Image (cartoon, rainbow, N blue to C red):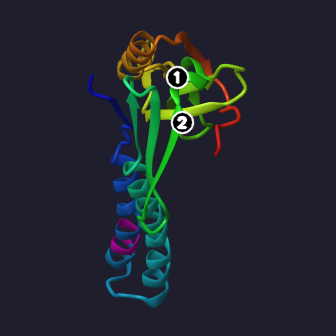
Amino acid sequence: MAPIRVKSQIPYWPLVMTALFPFVFVGLNYLHSGEWNKVPLITGAIFLLVPIFGGWSQAIERQRWCDIDLTHRKVTVHTVTMWFAPKVQSYSLDQFGAVRSYLAGHKRVDCHVELVTKPGGEGLLLATFPPNSTSTSFWSIPKDSEPATAQTLRQMVAGQCGLEDQGFLGGRWPGAQLSK
């Protein structure tokens, strides 16, 4: 049986919007004054560092995936270091007893899907998805909920690996993560 490959879905639009801000700032200043001033150019260059480092961080996040091998009962997490050197960690699937999903974060909310150890104290992040945002009307505040991709992944992992499906827990802070 082929391993289950799990990869996060990270949206590009926040990074693109952040990258456009310095150019809009410098452009509006030029349109207002009619000349290139040093202060807005330097400020724009400093503001440009934010999306550069954010892009670096997202590039590292995009290189992470998990393989769940049912024949060898093993979970392998593939990541890269800050300088993109490959890093692989393996865990026995038998040490996990459940899978769950929840919303985590304050300003940037993501839906996390994780395996939970049998004692229940630690989790192993499988993937991150942008949440569904729904509202009852145009004037109401959107409410975040579990996306269909996270629900499908959670149910598939629980069913194929023989783990308890703890379901969607709503909003909460991430608990202790499994470390080697």
Q: Mark 2, residues whose alpha carbon is within 10 Å: few (<14), some, or many (≥20)? A: some
Q: Is residue 159 visible?
A: yes
Q: Position of residue 16 (x, y in %)?
A: 34, 55
The residue furthest front is: 72
The answer to the question of whether label 1 and label 2 lie on touching residues, with beta carbons closer than 8 A, is: no
Residue type indicated by callout 2: Tyr
- Look at the numbered disc 2 and give the secondary structure of its residue: strand
Q: Is residue 64 above or below residue 35?
A: above
Residue at point 42%, 32% (across, down): 129
Towards the viewer: 76 or 132: 76
Circle nearer the N terminus (1, 2): 2
Asked if residue 39 lies in the magenta stretch, the reply is: no
Q: Which residues are magenta?
A: 24-28
**At label 1, which amino acid type do we have?**
Ile
Q: Is residue 121 left or right of residue 82?
A: right
The residue at 41%/28% (across/down) is 72
Residue identifier under label 1: 141
Q: Is residue 160 above or below residue 123?
A: above
Residue at the spot of label 2: 91
| Tag of residue 84 | none
